[in-house]
Amino acid sequence: MLPALSVQRPTTTWGCFNAMWAASRRPWPPMPDVWSWMRTAVTPDRTVCWPSTTSTRVRTRWLAPRTESGGSYSRPLCSRCRRWGGRAGGTTPPERWCPGRSAPSALSWEPDRPLRIGYISPDLFTHSVSYFAEAPLTHHSPARGYQHYVYSCVPKPDPKTVRLRAATEAAGGVWRDVARLNEAELAELVRRDEIDLLVELTGHTANNRLGVMARRPAPVQLTWIGYPNSTGLKAVDYRLTDDVCDPWDTKQTFVEELVRLPGCFLCYSPAVDAPPVAPAPALANGYITFGSFNNLAKITPQVLRIWGAVLAAVPRSRLVLKNKPFACEAARGHVLQQLAAVGVESWRVDLLPLAPGNAEHLATYALMDISLDPFPYAGTTTTTESLFMGVPCLTMAGHCHAHNVGVSLLTAVGLHRPAKPQNRILQQQAAAPASPSCAVPSATSDHHQQRAGEAENSSMSSSPLSTSNCAVAGDVCASGGAAAAAGLVSRSGWVAHSEAEYVALAVAHASDVKTLAELRYSLRERMLASPLCNAPVFLRRLEGVYRSLWRRHCFTLSGDSAAADAAAEAAGLRQPLLAAPAPATAVSATC
């Protein structure tokens, strides 16, 4: 964590940071962290909000996900989260119920009684998290036995905050403005409200209230939406995800238990001021425009190298990027220089600053034919915005949660059909000794083995894109013709499993402007009809998970381990035990 310093305060932002870090005598952090601190630490009057050793919200900014070390970044990051959680949670009471309550009554641990769900977030304004928080805030129902409380820590409410509050209260929820409360006061308020399950939506991002979670004001505590890694707090019991972002065999580690929701772990509520979908610009331009409006910190030199290979493989294509730093000429020059180093001429690139409003921001998607997802830290809100504006997104699967979010979103919309995961019975059969009799492996088993081999052999984002692979990707349409391109798209859709496949898919999709135009006009309605935007169905599933987690808690306290295990499986904490496939047709012993 940053030390509290007593130094002479310089007059510039950069001078403030440089002096502070020099006095701390610590190695320089990665540059995205520097920009993050400079963006939040300097007040409008150019004075500095110096970091405090007692402020959880300041300290956790230094656990932001980092992209400079590729797909393996999650392991050291989770270690940092765990170390932070060990310090922050050192005073957490050991009880599994709220410390503010006296001895619980029999009713308190009744597994099927009405529940009180609490949500804590500082991002309930026009912020990325709000587009996924809106569904639970506005679709819980006390009539179904789920009374929800919203603890809004928004420092500067905007019209969306007002709209979310009205919708929450219309659904029977309770909205509390708690931005002025400190962590101890907010924890005590949660206890007085007798919340059963408390869900924080921020993780280690700006203005979080993880210090409240460390005090365990609720018997069951969860983290969701805002952060792609662990909170590091033992007081946070569960993390909501899905089996695409976090497969059952994931190597990423978490302090929390992973609760895999059925389907995508997110439900998207589109902006109410979104403009109509515009025609595909390639129809009028005569060339394909690729683009990305993701945070500039996600667009690493490795990502630019692959995007450069895409542009090299698609003649006359262009690239449009939009980000806040592009209002600065120096930032624009730096990115253009990086692109030039991978062979992209400056005239093929448009770098746009932020739009003045959300409607104008969404309208900018009219410039783009195909959206390119960065890696290993994929987009989330940017991806859903792109899809809602009719622009399909090309993403890459990876080894950690942040890498796979795009795959989950595209699966929910129907632009990707992943292989079915191998269930536990198949895994047990595969581990059993082979029978001496002749057997013919089923097509399903072969498919699992092939997909497992692809996952094992694909180097994902960490492997270099060789010259030969780039040539193959670039020639996928020219040498193989339309049939080869169609075959690649049919097999992989919009999800790549390697850098070479990423380039090849971009080339294949860019070669079929007619299909792109047709998809563009149908994508919004397709998305609205998909599980990704079906808030009522999503909430019933989510409430079912909440109920199962509560039952597990109650059965654990009562000592009923069998019922607790059943509740854990129902909640998505255990891989489902599916039925074994039908036996293969008998064949001759002389095969």
Image (spheres, helix red, strand yellow):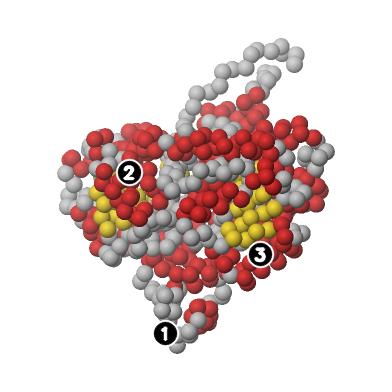
Position of the C terminus, as image quadrant, is top right
Instruction: Give the SS element for disc 1.
Output: loop
Query: Of the residues shown, which amino acid type is indicated by label 1?
Result: Ser
Identify the mark at residue 138; answer none if there is no mark.
2
| Nearest the eye: 495 or 94 | 495
- Measured Cα–Cα span from mark 2 to mark 1: 46 Å
Mark 1, other Cα within 10 Å: few <14 / some 14–19 / many ≥20: few
Residue name at image x 56 percent, y 31 percent? 420
In the image, taking residue 332 as reference, residue 413 lies left or right, namely left
Instruction: Determine the image quadrant of residue 496.
Output: top right
In the image, taking residue 554 as reference, residue 475 lies left or right, namely right
Image position, residue 492 (x, y; %): 65, 37
Position of the N terminus, as image quadrant, is bottom left
Q: Which residue is mark 3?
A: 335
Instruction: Determine the image quadrant of residue 464.
Output: bottom right
Residue name at image x 73 percent, y 40 percent? 511
Instruction: Give the SS element for disc 3.
Output: helix
- Camera-near label (3 vs 1) is 3
Identify the mark at residue 6; answer none if there is no mark.
1
